[in-house]
């Protein structure tokens, strides 16, 4: 070095801006027609509002994918959580099919790419679904801890969300457990 000026790239010192690695919360919301039954999506909206507020307070980044209609739709990809998500959440409606498996595949590819770009980032998956998927092939497990929130309600419950959580190696919680807490 010459008077504090680097001559080569190796002379440069790089420091992270924060001591702690960033967190990324990948949230997949199943907004298919079946989630309208028994106020499941309405209650999930309240839970999602709390989740977005927590992400904002913890300065986490969010990736938000909606599974409804024919194909999953990205709402946010890796941005800091903000209050602008409240407007999206208020307008969220249910309808159409359940491209949940396509959403999981898309999320897995996106998370793998992101992990290569930001290796220190801590990723988490939150999947909100009623599990009403007819069948699924062997699912690839995502390389991050996950939580599946089951929003299936009604007198007859198929219990597929619990099976889906086991296939994804994710923790399982029913929304009624989380709301009553």
Image (spheres, rainbow, N blue to C red):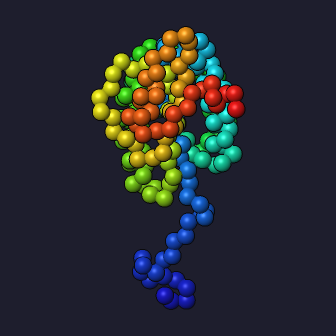
Q: Quadrant of residue 139?
A: top left
Q: Residue 95, how many percent across, how many down?
A: 49, 14
Would you say 118 lies left or right of 86 here?
A: left
Would you say 138 lies left or right of 161 here?
A: left
Query: How many labels, in total?
Result: 0
Q: Residue at x 66, y 41 (%)?
A: 54
Q: Residue extending furthest bottom? A: 2
Q: Residue at x 48, y 77 (%)?
A: 12
Q: Is residue 45 above or below residue 22?
A: above
Q: Residue 10, how many percent across, how many down?
A: 42, 79
Front-most of residues 9 and 104: 104
Q: Quadrant of residue 119?
A: bottom left
Q: Residue 172, how many percent across, how many down?
A: 51, 34
Q: Quadrant of residue 109?
A: top left
Q: Residue at x 45, y 47 (%)?
A: 144
Would you say 168 lies left or right of 179 here?
A: left
Front-most of residues 144 and 1: 144
Residue 84 appears in the picture as rendered: no
For the C terminus, the image quarter is: top right
């Amino acid at each position: 070095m010459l008077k504090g000026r680097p001559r080569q790239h190796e002379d440069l010192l790089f420091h992270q801006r924060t001591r702690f690695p960033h967190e990324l919360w990948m949230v997949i919301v199943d907004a298919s027609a079946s989630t309208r039954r028994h106020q499941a999506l309405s209650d999930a909206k309240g839970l999602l509002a709390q989740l977005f507020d927590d992400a904002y307070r913890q300065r986490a980044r969010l990736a938000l994918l909606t599974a409804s209609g024919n194909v999953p739709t990205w709402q946010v990809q890796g941005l800091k959580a903000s209050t602008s998500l409240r407007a999206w959440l208020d307008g969220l409606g249910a309808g159409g099919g359940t491209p949940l498996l396509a959403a999981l595949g898309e999320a897995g590819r996106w998370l793998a790419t992101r992990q290569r770009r930001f290796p220190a980032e801590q990723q988490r998956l939150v999947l909100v679904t009623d599990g009403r998927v007819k069948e699924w092939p062997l699912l690839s497990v995502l390389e991050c801890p996950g939580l599946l929130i089951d929003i299936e309600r009604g007198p007859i419950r198929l219990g597929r969300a619990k099976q889906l959580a086991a296939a994804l190696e994710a923790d399982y919680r029913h929304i009624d457990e989380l709301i009553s807490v």
